[in-house]
Amino acid sequence: MSTIITLVVLAALALYVVSIFNKLVSLKNRHQNAFAQIEVQLKRRYDLIPNLVETAKGYLKHERETLEAVISARNQALAGLQAASADPTSATGMAQLGGAESALTSALGRLNVVMEAYPDLKANQNMMQVSEELTTTENRVAFARQAFNDAVTAYNSYKQQFPPVLFAGAFGHGQDANLLEFEDSAAIQAAPKVQF
């Protein structure tokens, strides 16, 4: 009889350990999927920026430095995204992406200031359409980033709790996932302003 009770207890314990493993895998997959959603939105953003710059070029011929800074920042952000995409669990990749995104946001802010000085540019239909798309994309990026950070927090919280903390390292979940934080996160909290 005691053998049966021992086997039942061991089977229940084994099932509990399996459920911990499965939940760790599920939470890790959720935060990796959430990063993939950020990646989609950032790629969309990076594709829109050259259109914005091309539309503005005709009006801003003497503002070449500003336009080149935007394209350069966009290229750096794309490189940061590619590095982070290669390993979404890498703290270095997330930090590189965060820094590049901050530089891009700053460059876009300078472009918006320059555009304010050109009423004809602000009234251009193509410029208004691209700017609206960019604003929509910025909102989608913010939402995707929030979902990613929520998924990372859920993953890290679960794996740091007792008893999962006893098994997380053995199951290949030793490192905490990293939040995607931008250097100027306080400034990013405000929605981008595109005015015409």
Image: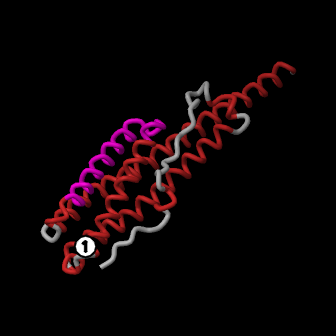
- Whether residue 80 appears in this view of the structure is yes
Residue 175 location (% of width, % of height):
56, 32
In screen coordinates, is 34 left or right of 131?
right
Residue 55 can be seen in this image: no
**Nearest to the observer: residue 66 or residue 39:** 66
Which residue is under mark 1? 129
Q: Where does residue 144 sit, x and y in percent of width and height?
A: 45, 56
Residue at 60% from the left image edge and 40% from the top image edge: 23
User: Taking 22 as reference, is 106 left or right?
Assistant: left
Position of the C terminus, as image quadrant, is bottom left
Residue 54 quadrant? bottom left
Q: Quadrant of residue 135?
A: bottom left
Residue 85 falls inside the magenta stretch: yes
Residue 50 magenta-highlighted? no
Q: Is residue 142 above or below residue 178?
A: below
The main secondary structure of the magenta stretch is helix
68, 142: nearer the viewer: 68
* Magenta-drawn segment: 65-94
The structure residue drawn at horizontal position 55% and vertical position 37%, both measured from the top left corner, is 25
Q: Is 54 placed above or below 31 here? A: below
Residue sticking out furthest to the right = 1
